[in-house]
Amino acid sequence: MNDPSAGEVGGLFAGAVAMLVAIGHGLRWWLGWTDRRAENRAVKLDAWQRELAAREARFDERQDEYQRRIELELDKVRSEHAALFAGYQLIATELRTINPKSDALRRADELLRATFSAETSLPASFSALTRRLDNID
């Protein structure tokens, strides 16, 4: 075997250095690409999280509004129910003075008791009104 010349050794050294530089640049590009990819992904994830939070806030607002409407309707139905029940009691009391053994009133009472869990006492305002009506005679 013949000994390598100084030029050959220098060429091999230059080739190895060039190869290492190329690999270094390739790794730097690849690592930069993954960093940019991670940054883009983080930006997209942050935007998605903000959108999700805004969506949840809108949903919560709609739920709160729906709950308020339900509660208003429920209050309205309760007051209507109380007024109807009190009105029935006033009319039934008056009709019982006319016909105490009325079968229709007995059935109406049974129907109302079966349908509604009505309170046995009237609201204070209606109780006062019935006492005033009873004292009219």
Image: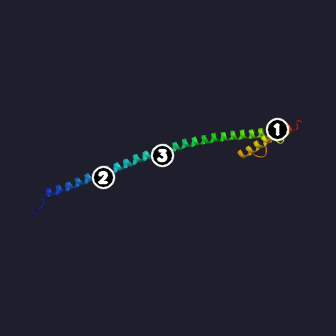
Of the numbered discs 2 and 1, the one sitting upstream in the chain is: 2
Could one spot residue 129 in this view of the protein?
no
**CB within 8 Å, label 3 to label 2:** no
Q: CA distance from mark 1 to mark 3?
A: 68 Å
101 or 129: nearer the viewer: 101
Q: Position of residue 134 (x, y in %)?
A: 86, 39
Of the numbered discs 1 and 3, the one sitting upstream in the chain is: 3
Q: Position of residue 133 (x, y in %)?
A: 85, 37
Q: Position of residue 11 (x, y in %)?
A: 17, 55
Q: Residues within 10 Å of mark 3 (few under 14, many from 20)?
A: few
Q: Secondary structure at mark 2?
A: helix
Instruction: Identify the residue at horizontal 25%, vertical 54% (top origin).
Output: 20
Q: CA distance from mark 2 to mark 1?
A: 99 Å
Position above or below: 7 against 134: below
Residue marked by disc 2:
27
Residue marked by disc 3:
49
